[in-house]
Amino acid sequence: MSGYYTKLRARRTYRWEGKPTSEDRKLKRRYYGSLSIAVDRRPAEAVVSVGQYILIEGHDDDNPFVAQLLKLFCDDNGNKKAEVQWFVRMCEIHQNKRKLLGRSPHPQEVFYYQDRSCDNEVDAETILGSVQVCVYKAPFPDRENKDTLFVKLVWDTKAFRIMDPELFQPPQSPKSPPPYQHAPRVRALPTPDPTVMKRAMIGVHTRSSMSTGKMGTSEAESAHSASKLSAAKVLNMKRRSRISSNPNIRKKLDLCSEFSSIILLADANNEQCIFLLLTDRLHVSSVPESLPCREQEFQDIYSFVESKIMDGTGGCMYISGVPGTGKTATVHEVIRSLLQAAEQDEIPHFRFIEINGMRMTDPHQAYVQILQKLTDQKATADHAAALLEKRFSMPAPKKETTVLLVDELDLLWTRKQNVMYNLFDWPTRRHARLVVLTIANTMDLPERIMMNRVASRLGLTRMSFQPYNFKQLQQIITSRLNRVKAFEEDALQLISRKVAALSGDARRCLDICRRATEICEHSGQQGGTKLVGMSHVMEALDEMFSSSYITAIRCASLQEQLFLRAVIAEFRRLGLEEATFQQVFVQHQGLCRMEGLQPISVSEGLAVCQRLGACRLLLLEPSRLDLLLRVRLNVSQDDVLYALKAD
Amino acid sequence: MSKRKSREAHLAVGDCVAQVQRILRERFCHQRLPDRPVGLESQYKHLLELLRRTAVHGESNSVLIVGPRGAGKTMLLRCALRELLELQEVKQNVLQVHLSGLLQTDDRIALKEITRQLHLENVVGDKVFGSFAENLVFLLEALKRGDKSSSRPVFFILEEFDLFAHHKNQTLLYNLLDVSQSAQAPVAVVGLTCRLDVLELLEKRVKSRFSHRQIHLLSCMSFCQYLDAFRSELALPDDFPDSKFSQEWNLNVSELCEEKSVQEILQKHFNSCKDFRSLHLLLLLALTRVSVSNPTLRAVDILEASRMSSADSKANILHGLSVLELCLIIAMKHLNDIYEGEPFNFQMVHNEFKKFIQRKSHSIHNFEKPVVIKAFEHLLQLELIRPVDGGVCKVQREYQLMRLMLDHTQVMEALQRYPQCPTDVKQWAISAFG
């Protein structure tokens, strides 16, 4: 029986200890000094009071979160809440940044956590109990006391710093002012981060409420609204300035001038070098400094993701467009700019995760990949789904916004659509802070393949990338070439018009340019200015787009040509577009005699037929049908006759 | 001195023939590469340049080599690789992965093969091979980590490229082509296929990632070039041990080319099929007839080889039939003529056969019906006749509908060649409408 009970989590009951120390009427909060925690089947009650170090329940049962209790209060709904200063363990820090510490951490070492984007308010009922935390300047003690944790450094999500002794208030004096007032948290530029707002406001309030009751609240209110207003203003201004003085544009211009000077230098001595440089720049893989012709889309996606990150909320966006219109590139560009902004502390930090439907063997692998990229854990698909579900639905503190890019969304389709459902459902959870950007080719994918409940969760934030028109394609090439005069004006025009008429696929356009450059390079025309001209472009276009059926028919052997003629003759006789081999073969024999050739045997005839079938000039049934296999033409009769007449 | 030399030459006739057999068979059967691809110079240059760019400059590329069977696609590629690998820096750096659509029938097998050929099998997890999903993630990760300047270029060579397009979601093709279009490890994806419509098989996003470079191998060989090829394929090399024998042999080959009958045979072959494989087959059959007693190639040998290679596959089967079975086939042929190719059953054939026995035959016994059924079933077993819809067993055997799998000409030819065929049977076959 006892074995059975150990499996269950012990139920805890929470009770305020003593009377409220103060009350905030505006926010309808009552503040308390301490909280007692009673655990089932344990006689003693634990008491935690303000200023003490506590353990808070998290994802990991072995390593609960550590924090210092700053405040205990009861909000307007009667829920018990606590405000805390977080400490992080080494295992909670992102793996890539662990090496910044420069030494191996002590197993019981924690770090004072300094990050404004993190939610400092937790449910008081997640508190597990108190813990000992000591500051150490000297080397860590060797004695093994599992209950004591050590603090030495501050972690501000970018670097470890030596702890400011003022930050750390020993728990012996709970009456002393809370440490956050000394903490270097006052930011030059306020941003509408709700947690920060709230904390600032509460700070003002508590101080004032200690001195005078009613006046303090009004003061707090005004401070609150003022800070909010100014924050919004500053944010708007900042956004506007970012748009007007886009750092990318500046960068591009800088590069331009630099690059052209290089070319001028190189022009004199080495032509080979230019061509190499050209093909390099025209390769699809080269990452351009800016994405021309996608400014509007860039701006829309940028503001969508930015606003979600700022507000700490979640959302979905669906991006569609035919292949090669820059969907993935634009999203990557947005993320790059956002990461830059986060680096410069303009917006809170966030995680970026990318999955691609084509890069997984099964739609359910999406869970595994997301989990692995988030936490470096390996799990089976089902387990990963459960873990992610827990992660996104639990009100976990210290959570950054996650931006998830799902490329080739249509391949995540399953019969029950549970993968898509989950992906779009998570952002709607209150504590998820997940932004999902999805990319696919078809504009009406949500209507066509998704069930109503999935499509509804995806929402209506949609964007479609139009195929490039010829002007845009031209602009793309010129921006890639960066003022190097390598193409004749007409040649560029021809390429962009041709591609725009076919598909509007920028990849195709660049491929043609690259091929034309190669042809030009090898044309062997020495001396003079080597520009890629119309003839080179025509040759490249011919190579890539011309149908090879007609050449194939012209190059076929005589018997194969005769067989094609026999097929057409038989079709005309039957009035159908289909005939059996036997019928065609009779015609073939007749044609042979007319041409004065020795008739071929049935086996040879069948071999001829199979060869044409392998090239797909003919469509054939499987050859075990022998004489009865049905033959159809895969090219139009006119094409065959044209090809055969010409010689 | 001179005496000894001449004696040596005499002694070597047997050896010489053995040498000739060895050299030429290697040439015909082992797909030995020629020194330079013949008639494909521009395509060769294009492919070589493209591979060189990947190997030396680290520029990713993708290309399709399209041409009918036997046009020399693999030969072209292997020649280009051979020339490229002569460069020391390329030889040390380049990794090659050879896949074939006929062997790697799905992406799971293909991935395993890629990991094996890149010698990465011990790196995936702790196991020799991880699961399919792990493998894919690992491989993509490995390719993604690389960059243009520091990683070794990889050539992916996909034979029977069209079969890869039938894999689920075209995952492998998408990922390979995607790597070739992004700033990851430099790869060259070379696909070989004989289908002209291969691009239509690719899904649109896979197609968009393919560079659309196609090298078409469509030979416009003239008969003169074909004759030259014939001569050079048979010619013995200069370093043949016995120079006198090789001179005689080469002279003989040149004379053969001039000969009218040989030219006719070659013209016939050329008309039916231009590629080198069929020429090799013909020459191999001719070569088997060269022996010590017959140390040179004669026109007769080539004639015989041509007869063998163009023989009809059903002629021999017809040759071994009994007269009764032959009569049944003739009856079927008449039924086909009367009903314009409509299917028939045993009863109809038997009636036709009985009519022939009663009216015209003088030499054939009146066989019992079971005997005739037995003969009919033998024909069924030889697949000279075939039941119409896959042999549904509901109807009695005598009434099951059948079709004759022989052409009119095949029946007549078989009758001509049949040893001691009764005259009345021949007459019956020739006469219209039984």
Image (cartoon, rainbow, N blue to C red):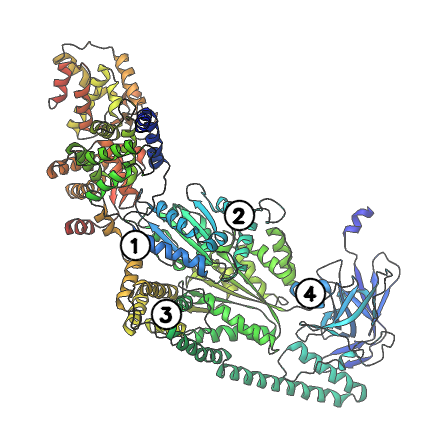
Question: Are dots 4 and 1 on a single chain?
Answer: no
Q: Is residue A548 above or below residue B149?
A: above
Q: Amino acid at mark 2?
A: Thr
Q: Amino acid at mark 3?
A: Glu
Question: Are dots 4 and 2 on a single chain?
Answer: no
Earlier in the chain: of badge 4 and badge 3, it is 4
Q: Is residue B134 left or right of A583 when viewed as pictured?
A: right
Q: Are marks 4 and 1 in contact (CB under 8 Å)?
A: no
Given residues A396 and A265, the one toward you in this image is A265
Dot in front, 3 or 2: 3
- CA gap, disc 3 to disc 2? 40 Å
- CA gap, disc 4 to disc 1? 55 Å
Disc 3 crowd, CA 10 A, few/some/many (<14, 14-19, 20+): some
Q: Are marks 1 and 2 in contact (CB under 8 Å)?
A: no
Dot in front, 3 or 1: 3
Q: The disc numbered 2 marks a residue on which chain?
A: B
Question: Percent from the top left, x then y, of residue B115?
Answer: 53, 48
Question: Percent from the top left, x then y, of residue A422?
Answer: 56, 59
Q: The disc numbered 3 marks a residue on which chain?
A: A
**Residue A630, labelled with which disc?**
none
**Residue B42, labelled with which disc?**
1
- CA gap, disc 3 to disc 1? 23 Å
At mark 1, the secondary structure is helix
Residue B56 visible to an observer of this rendering: yes
Q: Amino acid at mark 4?
A: Lys
At mark 3, the secondary structure is helix
* Total count of labels: 4
Q: Which residue, given by chain and number where applicable, does mark 4 sit on?
A: A99
**Residue A271, labelled with which disc?**
3
Q: Which residue, given by chain and number where applicable, does mark 2 sit on?
A: B115
